[in-house]
Image (tube, grey):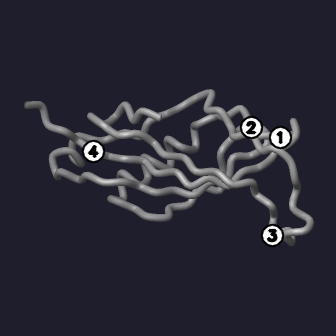
């Protein structure tokens, strides 16, 4: 997923079905199809952060709900308070076609890696 606010880098999204702490024998079976991003929003990468050469990756946890909206966003690993907040605000604005299991929408847990890399012009 291109991160348009940086000179290079891509979002990495890892998903798992949210099973609400069900025992293994009660977890749903069948083919799981991942969500598809319908609306993507990149975080702001302010000039002040670029000037300070703040570079790295923000890692977030979130739940992608059956209706495709994102909630329960939590910071797993931060980079800078402003960039962390910008990443969380951007992710909250994403919209997905929800994941499905056997054709039925399901909630997913997601871990999202958002890069902030600035490559100065040569």
Q: Secondary structure at mark 1?
A: strand
Would you call the spot at circle 1 few (<14 residues within 10 Å), some (14-19), or many (20 or more)? some
- Quadrant of residue 62 within the rendered picture: bottom right
Label 3 sits on residue: 21
Label 4 sits on residue: 117
Label 2 to label 1: alpha-carbon separation: 6 Å
Of the image marks 1 and 3, the number of the one nearer the N terminus = 3
Dots 3, 2 in contact, CB < 8 A = no
Instruction: Tell me residue 96's x, y (percent).
Output: 67, 34
Check the picture and name the quadrant holding the C terminus: top left
Of the image marks 3 and 4, the number of the one nearer the N terminus = 3
Would you call the spot at circle 4 few (<14 residues within 10 Å), some (14-19), or many (20 or more)? many
Of the image marks 4 and 2, the number of the one nearer the N terminus = 2
Label 1 sits on residue: 105
Of the image marks 3 and 2, the number of the one nearer the N terminus = 3
As drawn, the label of residue 98 is 2
């Amino acid at each position: 997923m291109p991160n348009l606010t940086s000179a290079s880098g891509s979002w990495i999204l890892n998903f798992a079905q949210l099973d609400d702490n069900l025992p293994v024998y009660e977890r749903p079976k069948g083919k799981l199809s991942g969500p598809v991003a319908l609306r993507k929003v990149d975080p702001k990468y302010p000039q002040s952060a670029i000037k300070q050469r703040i570079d790295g990756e923000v890692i977030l946890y979130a739940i992608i709900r059956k209706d495709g909206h994102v909630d329960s966003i939590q910071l797993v690993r931060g980079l800078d308070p402003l960039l962390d907040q910008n990443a969380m605000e951007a992710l909250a604005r994403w919209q997905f076609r929800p994941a499905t299991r056997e054709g039925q929408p399901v909630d997913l847990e997601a871990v999202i890696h958002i890069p902030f890399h600035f490559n100065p012009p040569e």
